[in-house]
Amino acid sequence: MRFAIRLRPENEPFRIPFNHQHMLQGLIYRRIQRVNPDLSLRLHSPKIPKLFTFSLFMAEKRKIAEDGSGLLGYKRGYFYFSTAVPEIAEAFVTGLLQGPEVELWGERFVVEEVKALAEPERLSGRKFVTLSPIAVTTKRVQLGKPRSYDLGPDEPEFYELIRENLREKYLAIYAERPPEEFEMKVLNAKPKRFEVKPGIFQVAWHLVFRAKGDEGLLRAGYMAGFGEKNSIGFGMVKVDGRKERVKRRWKGGEGNREGKTT
């Protein structure tokens, strides 16, 4: 299940800092907690897979701020949210509609529209583009101690760990033995360094890639994210060149739901 969330700003232009995933993550958890406190508590456990991801925050029109601190957005802001768990989707969307006034990094918005997006019938063999960069880490010995190391698509382990991560998601979603069939070919890659918490950095990759293999494995990545750290805003992808078809549209405001499809 995936959704497009469109927000109307109180002021224009509005600021979008480069390092903003943790603030979007906070919004997601607060809205889930508002509707389903037990679910929110479970999602804070480090022992369970979160099985949701989200895109970077975007704007209908944007430019880099003169001071280089981020972007200036115009018209409306928006982001995408995806999960393999209906309970998470219901809690987050309901929480947004019940409390449409949103404050992010000091900017105020109103949730104007939430769209449920149709999923493609086939994923194997398709080309994908990241909506938030893919993060893959391992441990490497540095200065005599094992330290976290951010892998890139020029290293074979990058693909091995993505496959194993997909198999873990598959097991959590479908509760059956995960298949092995997965291949990924990167067509274009661009690294980006993010500050995910004060003083903690992650190098992740904006990618265009083609993937083929078991449909269940690919759908696990499509719904819950490719790579690691999906619940803090990494690894969301879209099918390249595919115009997202709207399944259902919810307007902001109490009790205002449209059941239109396009």
Image (cartoon, rainbow, N blue to C red):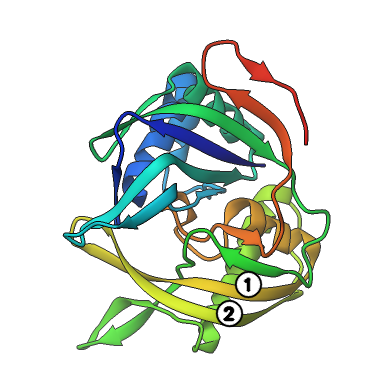
The amino acid sitting under disc 1 is: Arg
Residue beneath the point at 66% across and 36% down: 116
Q: Is residue 171 left or right of residue 79?
A: right
Q: Is residue 48 above or below residue 65?
A: above
The residues bearing labels 1 and 2 have C-alpha atoms spaced at a distance of 6 Å
Residue 246, horizontal then vertical, whole percent: 71, 39
Image mark for residue 163: 1
Residue 165 location, x and y as percent?
Answer: 58, 66
Q: Which residue is mark 2?
A: 159
Total marks placed: 2
Looking at the rendered structure, which numbered label has been put on residue 172?
none
Kindly give the residue lying farthest to the right in the view shown.
Answer: 121
Task: Determine the residue located farthest toward the top in the rendered image.
Answer: 255
**Identity of the residue drawn at 65% across and 34% down:** 86
Q: Quadrant of residue 91?
A: top right
Is 87 above or below relative to 59?
above
Compared with 109, 200 (above or below) is: below
> Residue at the spot x=44%, y=77% of the render?
190
Please tell me which residue lies in front, 10 or 197: 10
